[in-house]
Amino acid sequence: MRKIVIVGAGASGVYLSILLKKEMIDCDVIVLEQNSAPLKKLLATGNGRCNLSNQYINKECYQSDHPNLVYDIVRHFDVQEEMNELGLYSYYQGQLLYPKSEQALSVKHVMMQRAEELGVLFFYNQEVISIKEHGTYTLYTQQQTFHADTVIWAMGSEAGKLSGINTSRYDLLYKLNLNVVKPQPSLVQMKTNPIMKQWKGVRVKGTFSLLENHQCIHQEKGELLFTDYGVSGIAVMQLSAFYQSGHQYQLMIDFFDEIDEKKLSEYIELRINKGYNHFYDGLLHTKIASYFEKKPNDVVEQIVKQLKHFSLDIVGLNSFETAQVMKGGLSLKEVNDDLSIKKYPHMYAIGEILNVAGLCGGYNLHFAFASASHVAKAIEREDNVTST
Ligand SMILES: Cc1cc2nc3c(=O)[nH]c(=O)nc-3n(C[C@H](O)[C@H](O)[C@H](O)COP(=O)(O)OP(=O)(O)OC[C@H]3O[C@@H](n4cnc5c(N)ncnc54)[C@H](O)[C@@H]3O)c2cc1C
């Protein structure tokens, strides 16, 4: 009986196990997981609500060393339809796909029940630490050895600390002589200078730009939260995807993105003429208003600049512990178009262990599921060839 071993019981690994066992009932499908339970990271997604996918899928939504391949994998994959097939009702809230239950826990229940009904075999507390190739494969954990005809790496990343912070996921790949692009936190909070500690806890809506040498690298409209180390919030997480270490960036905040500079200048002029003592109160959050305190000689241009071009230096990102994904991972140059590894027969990689990082908004789970489906089809094709 053909043995397929998937390393990692995250979103990609569990979904792949379901697809394989459904189509290839005669195969043993085994999932090895280092944690004591599956899908730990999935439970934390979307603040526990699990943002499964996004209606808008484009090449620019992913960073990778082979964007065309990523786009080929994700563009026709319909997470809503596939989850429905498993028995999970999901629906779009705006562009974002969520389970109707708004609970990541129900996604876990549906996936695990389906996998267990089909007869997928799960082994927990089994960290794979090495592998030997001898026509087929032997995988070693601290406790046991497992034989496999086909191996799939679905080891995710250390982002969020929920999938373990071991180094075995990358060590395994290095030992196989595979190129791993250095993992770096992405979709993560940013540290600023100065730290606007007085504004801690304040949320602002506006347009936020990441600047390098006064050039805009990326811009996001949305919400930002001031913290005691810098800034957080969805808009900041998105900007962090464009941050590269060793570069110097500024964050520019447009507190008044709903009106242009000319209109804001006219309004500020009027406001100055009214002679309010409470000039900034009523314009901005009170904590920001008291920091901006108007001086008698402030001219319109200075005030408008402060409101539309308020700038802070970015001095770094928070660590992987609070990141949603890691940029980097197994280079796509090591894989064929079906995600099989060029140097080893019957070996594949899926999900976040690959050098693919999506933006916030369901793109990473979309890739985890789509890449699993892509590989399931490749393994089924392989199986059809060997059985004819
Ligand atoms: C807080 C948070 C919120 C997020 N929210 C969203 C969201 O709403 N929408 C979205 O699209 N994405 C979100 N993401 C990103 C998304 O969760 C991940 O990209 C996705 O879960 C990756 O799935 P995966 O199967 O590739 O990897 P993982 O989920 O990381 O699973 C990999 C598994 O492999 C196991 N493993 C690793 N090494 C070994 C080994 N050597 N031996 C055995 N097992 C091993 C790990 O323990 C883990 O269980 C979020 C991430 C975080 C941290």
Image (tube, grey):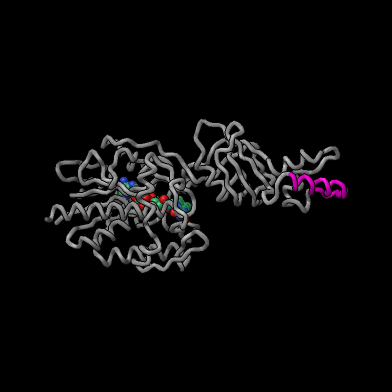
> In the rendered view, would you say 161 is above or below 296?
below
**Quadrant in the rendering for residue 181:** top left
Q: Where residue 188 sits in the image (x, y, percent)? A: 51, 45
Residue at 47%, 48% (x, y): give it.
Answer: 359
282 relative to 116 in the view: left or right: right
Can you say which quadrant of the picture contains the N terminus? bottom left
Q: Quadrant of residue 310?
A: top right
| Residue at 29 percent of width and 41 percent of height | 335
Of residues 30 and 370, the one drawn nearer to the viewer in this rendering: 370
Inspect this view and state whether residue 134 appears: yes
Observer able to see residue 201: no
Which of 57 and 251 lies nearest the eye of the viewer? 57
Secondary structure mainly formed by the magenta segment: helix
Question: Is residue 16 found left or right of 239 in the rendered image?
Answer: left
Which residues lie in the magenta part? 262-279
Total marks in image: 0
**Was residue 275 drawn as part of the magenta stretch in this picture?**
yes
Magenta stretch: includes residue 286: no
Q: Residue at x 81, y 48 (%)?
A: 279
Q: Horizontal and vertical percent for residue 264?
A: 75, 47
Percent across and percent down for residue 147 are 18, 49
- On-image quarter of the C terminus: bottom left
